[in-house]
Structures are given as structure tokens and as C-alpha cells.
Image (spheres, helix red, strand yellow):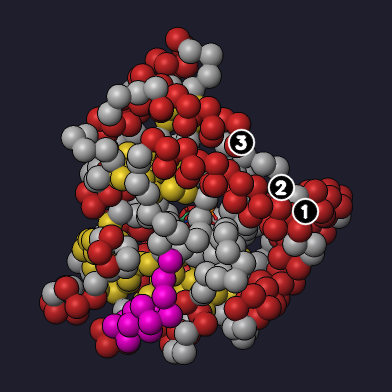
Amino acid sequence: MEFDFAMRIKKLPPYLFAEIDRLKAEQTKKRVNVIDLGVGDPDTPTPSNIVEALKKAAEKKENHRYPSYMGMLKFREAAAKWYKDRFGVELDPVNEVITLIGSKEGIAHLPWAFINPGDISLVPDPAYPVYAVATKFAGGDVYKMPLKEKNGFLPDFASIPEDIAKKARILFLNYPNNPTTAEATENFYKEAIDFAKKYEILLVSDAPYTEIYYDPGKRPISLMQIKGAKDVAIEFHSLSKTYNMTGWRIGFAVGNKSAVQGLGKIKTNVDSGVFQAIQEAGIEALSGDQSGAEKNREIYRERREAFIEGLESIGLDYVKSNSTFYLWIKLPEGYSSIEFSRKILEEAGVVVTPGVGFGEYGEGYFRVSLTQSTALLKEAIDRLKNLRF
Ligand SMILES: *Cc1c(COP(=O)(O)O)cnc(C)c1O
């Protein structure tokens, strides 16, 4: 028997990467090594102090039982302390912090708590696809906010029609941004808070890349640092990118008490929290030795410099940025992002992500992820040099 899918998944947009995946499989058959610069998943291991903490915690029998729904208080205290040390933000670990099974889980569940059918989420374009899909799953509608280079890849709130703003319940932001690599300014965050207050919108900041920066003198800011943020905002933070923990599934959200509560209510009815041993390892990640995170930044810095030098020698232009492990690169004249991605996969065995995969305003660009060794990144450049664009 073959079961008919529910409308909510039937209505999902066609999987844009299916064609790339098919071509990749074809090339893999022919070539020894396809260089995959497509996925944003750290290639280096989780720092050993964190792995050791998990091993110890896994032995404790009290960790083998159901965890608490909101997360271990000790983990939430560690998250609050991390926010205080890193951003100078005071958080009440009991009411203003919640543990998540990775930040994606929290982002995907949030609209279920705050979107009624017909309500609107304001979603950037290009963007991480979860914001729009989760809104639609909850029965809401999506209004796209274009991210344009001339605006520093920040949405222009003034261009959002009044009737849309009035129906909006959630506004998603993501800085440092995937895929454009842009950062938010303090002024922009102030504007976002004012806009959210005016229209009574829950402001959502997805911030997994605040610790992936290049100039230590210009570390990315948190929305929570801005005055009034807690009145209207929740911020998602992840251990995945900072500590190479994508497979562990742990993150957290902080901020507005009712936003945290609403998310907690959904989660109580859906999941049963994060394995406590992983939360104990998370405490070690957030409050233990930070040299692993620093090492990561050095690794990405070296890779990024090597790749940028290559791009410049080829004559490809990219967005200058101080954060994330991506490069947002402009297409050469005469190609769509899909055509270009297909060409370099077929002719050079290099996988990149076509910009349009993140939304229509991503057209004109492609994304490279620096989660491969410097040697492979250099080889990718050498292969691209041999192509005619
Ligand atoms: C990686 C990523 C996340 C999710 O990370 P988790 O592993 O679920 O914590 C969320 N948002 C963006 C923009 C990302 O790139």
C-alpha cells in the first residue's frame, strides 16, 4: 500500500537540490573525488574536553532517565552565564532559557506556539528554509523580506506594507547570516525591536554563527544586547557550529519569558528533552576550556584566506564579511545559479550551493562552505581555474 501524503508536505516547494544530488552521484561514479563545498557541517571533530565530559556523564545512572522538559537547570545556568560573559546579557535561567534538541528543532516548533491559521511570518529571502516551512506547517502564511546587497543584506522594514505588518506574528532574523555572511548592526537591531514593538510581533533571532568570526576585535553582536530586546525577542543559539557538535543535537533559546514558555509548551507535548549526558557535555562546551572554539576560528581563517586568494585570481567577486564559515560569491556573467552549479559539478567535480536554493533573491550568487581542508579548497580553486566561464 502506498499512502497519500498530507497536504502540508505535498505543498512543500520542490526539492531544488535533487538535481545537484543526482549529478553529484553521477560524477562520484566517474571520478575518484568530488569536492563537496555544499554542506555547512564542520568537518573537524568535537573538542576532546567535550567528548570526555560526555563519556563520564554517560556512565551516571541518573542520566539514563527522562530529562526535564525545559532542560537541566545546570545547563540553562551555564547558557545564562555564557550569555553574560560573552554579551553582557543578564538572563534568568529558570524562565528565560530553554534547552533544545539543536536550534533547528526549536525554530521548527516555535510557530506552532504563536501562529494561527492565516497569521503571517516575516521571513528573509534568501534564508535557511526552516523559517518558512515551519510557518506553513503551523497554518501560517509567509511574507518574504528580500535581503539585498545594497542594504547590506538587511531587510527594509519600511517597505513592508502596513496590512502585512498588522497580520504578522513572527519576524525571523539570522545574523551573522547564512547564506549571505552579512552581520547585523546595532542600529539595525534597534530598528527591528521598534518595528516588533509597534506591531506586537515576536522577533526571532537565529544566531548560530556569532562565534565564527575572523577579526577578534569585531565580534558579532547578539540581539539580546540591545535595550528592550527581552520585551519582544527570543534568540536561538547553537553549540553545533562553535564546537563542531552538529551531530550531538543540542542548542538553546533565550529571551522573552512568554516566548520561551510557549515554545516549552509545544515541546512538552512533542519531545522529552535532551539526553542529560549531552547536556552535561554542553555545560563543558559552554563553560570549560574554549581553546577548541579558538582553534576552529584559526582553521577557518586559514581556509578562508586561501580560498579568497583563489577567487581573486580567478576574478570571481564575493561578499566581504567578518563571520560565518561561508563565502557568498557572485556568479560570472551569463549564468543562472543552477546552471553555474551544474557546470562546475560536471566539468570540475566541485559541488557548491546555488543561491536560488535559499530563495529567489539568492539568484545571482552561489555559496561555498569552508568545511573542507585547505588542501581540498585549493584543489577546488585549481579545478575552477581550468574552466572557461
Ligand atoms: C546550522 C544552522 C542552524 C541549526 O543548527 P542546529 O544544529 O540545529 O543547532 C540554524 N540556523 C542556521 C541559519 C544554520 O545555518
Tag on residue 50?
1
* Quarter location, residue 157: bottom left
Query: Closer to the N terminus: mark 3 or mark 2?
Result: 2
The N terminus, quarter of image: top left
| Nearest the eye: 278 or 151 | 151
Q: Amino acid at mark 2?
A: Thr
When the figure is inspected, residue 189 is found, relative to residue 362, above or below; the finding is: below
Q: Is residue 383 visible?
A: yes
Q: 10 Å neighbourhood of mark 2: few (<14), some, or many (≥20)?
A: many
* Separation of residues labelled 3 and 2 (CA atoms): 16 Å
Proximity of marks 3 and 2: CB atoms separated by less than 8 Å: no
Tag on residue 373?
3
- Residue 193 lies in the magenta stretch: yes
Q: Amino acid at mark 3?
A: Ser
Proximity of marks 2 and 1: CB atoms separated by less than 8 Å: yes
Tag on residue 288?
none
Residue at 33 percent across and 82 percent down: it is 191
Q: Judge depth for marks 3 and 2 and give the one in front.
A: 3
* Separation of residues labelled 2 and 1 (CA atoms): 7 Å
Q: Secondary structure at mark 2?
A: loop
Residue at 41 percent across and 57 percent down: it is 320
Tag on residue 46?
2
In the rendered image, residue 185, in percent from the top left (x then y), is placed at 41, 75
Q: Secondary structure at mark 1?
A: helix
The C terminus, quarter of image: top left
* Quarter location, residue 321: bottom left
